[in-house]
Structure formats: C-alpha cells, structure tokens
Image (cartoon, grey):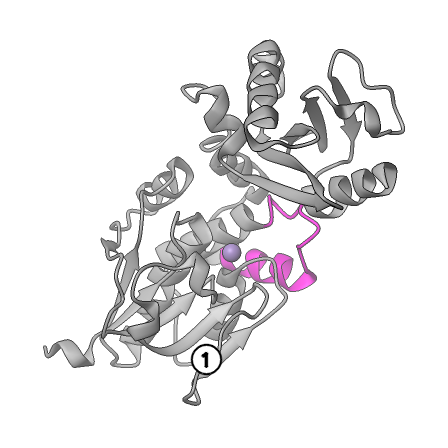
Amino acid sequence: MNQEEIIYIVGHKSPDTDAVCSAIAYSEYLKHKGIKAVPTICGELNPETKYVLEHFNIEEPISMCSTEDRKVILVDYNEDSQGFAGLENAKVVEVIDHHKIGFSSSDPIRFEIKPYGSTATIIAKRMFNNADFKIAKPIAGILLSAILSDTVIFKSSTTTTIDVKIAEQLSKIAEIEDVQRFGIELKKKKSSLNGMTSGQIICSDFKTFEVGSNGFGIGQVEVVDLSEAKQRKAELIEELNKIKEKENLLFVILMVTDIINEGSELLFSDGYESISFNGEIKDNSIYIKDMMSRKKDLVPQIMESIK
Ligand SMILES: [Mn+2]
C-alpha cells in the first residue's frame, strides 16, 4: 500500500488511556469503512493504559513522534503545544477532541469537539449511531476504560450524562458487570506512589498559577488510599520546599486525591500562612472532604483567600 493512502491517528504526547484507546478504536472504525488507518503513540504507555490493552488483548500502537508530511487525525488534543514535532507540516484531515479549541486549518476539515468527559465518548457515540458498524467486545472494553479513566469513574466534575449512558452501553458489549469495580481496578494501576521519588509524585501533574507578580504551584496525584502519602509526608514537604525555593513561588501544594473516599489531603510547603481554609492547616497539611478537582475546587479557594 502506498504511503499516501495511510492515515495515522495520533493523540497527545505523554499518552493517557483516552488518547491511546481513542486512536485504536477509531482506526478500527475507519478500517471498516475501507480506510487504511494506523493508530500511533508518542511516548511511553502508563501502567494504567498497559493494563487496559493487556486486559482486552489489544496490541500496543506503533510509536511515531513526528507527523511530518503525513496524513493525520488528531484525537484527544488539538493544540500544537501538546503534540509533537512536525505537526505544522502534517496534513491534519480530522480532529476529534474534548478540550478547548486551539487549532486552525486553511482547509475545511472534519472537526468535532464535544464538552464530554472523554474523547472515547465521542467516538463510541459515532459508532453507536452507525447501524452498519458493530462494536467488537475488546473495542467496547477499551472505550469503556478510557471513559472511566478520564472521568475518574464518573466522579470528576467533567462527567456528563452522555458519558454515563455510553459507558453503560459499552459495558454490556464488553461484558463488564461491575463497572465501578473495574474502574477502581484500572485506576489502582496508576495510583501507587510506590517506586516514585517525591519529586516525581509532585511533578507528574504540576501546574503553576499567577497572583499579581507572584505565583504558587499545585501538583496533583490520584490515589485509592492515602496511607502511602501520609507515611511519606515529611519527605514530600521537604521536596515541596525545594520546589518553592527553586521556582521562586509563594508556596507549593501537593493535592493527594483519594478517589475512593472522595476527598483530598493537601500538603503544603512553607509560606502557606497567607491562605485560609474552612479548617485549620496543621503540621503543613489538611484533609478536605469532597475536594476532587484542582481547577474547580482548590484554585478558586486559594485565589479568593490570598487576594
Ligand atoms: Mn481525554
């Protein structure tokens, strides 16, 4: 087959379960239409995604970190900064995503962005709407996994009723009776702090926020039990202080989110005295029930209290 006719499906770098499973599932859908589509990844698979592919007996996509001169479909991202080398020279023929729009094209292309909890939801919905296409059991399984992963088993505030409905339909095809339990099994793979240095724990998902000419930083990790983080508290706070100094921030927080009990343990570097919470911060930490989202629950509270 001539190179020209192949369409590569690419997700963002540092691939997550949604990006990888969406690429695989959508390539199956296109193959059914007679299009030669190849799913790809750029970067290492995380332990959660590895578990999902092994569980449903699906091959790892080929690695491709340059899109130069190729026909590509972007899934789960549409911004240059989150992609990889050569995107500006690639021919993007389609985009399927659930993030804000950061893309422009001089040609008319198929572009679908929906405010759903995952890209997999959009793809599964498209499949269900096509009466000619029958979703195979492993494909239903990986799409379900991607929805559960991105929505944190429907607990994230980004979850919509469509995600829940599509996941239910997929679980029947995938023959997964206990969706909650399967979701926890899946999340557990990525939520062990074991084997990670304190720096890796804080920086695996770290964002900084500006306040006037100053700023603060928050790292977030999702866990299924807080004991590991509590045991390593002293070491984690020491690392938070190092980052605060190095990055010249007002303070740095590690948000350890317990996805089972739905709450977060916040660990603070020095310098947190300028903010206030509904509870008392003791020994550089506080547990806040129902706090799950950095973006929606924590950041606005801090912004409010330090202004
Ligand atoms: Mn996603």
Picture quadrant of residue 202 = top right
Residue at position x 69%, y 45% from top? Answer: 210
Taking the image as shown, residue 261 lies to the left or right of residue 178, namely right
Q: Residues within 10 Å of mark 1 (few under 14, many from 20)?
A: few
Q: Is residue 232 above or below residue 59?
A: above
SS category of the residue bearing label 1: loop
Taking the image as shown, residue 108 lies to the left or right of residue 230, namely left
Taking the image as shown, residue 54 lies to the left or right of residue 295, namely left
Count of numbered badges drawn on the protein: 1
Where the N terminus falls, by quadrant? bottom left
Task: Indicate the position of residue 125 as horizontal and vertical percent values.
Answer: 52, 70
Q: Residue furthest bottom?
A: 108
Picture quadrant of residue 178 = top right
Where the C terminus falls, by quadrant? top right
Residue at position x 47%, y 61% from top? Answer: 76
Q: Residue furthest front?
A: 213
Task: Indicate the position of residue 254 as horizontal and vertical percent values.
Answer: 63, 28
Picture quadrant of residue 85 = bottom left
Q: Which residues are magenta?
A: 151-170
- Seen from the viewer's position, the closer of residues 27 and 221 is 221
Residue under label 1, please give it: 130
Q: Is residue 99 above or below residue 210?
A: below
Residue at position x 47%, y 63% from top? Answer: 77
Taking the image as shown, residue 247 lies to the left or right of residue 40, namely right
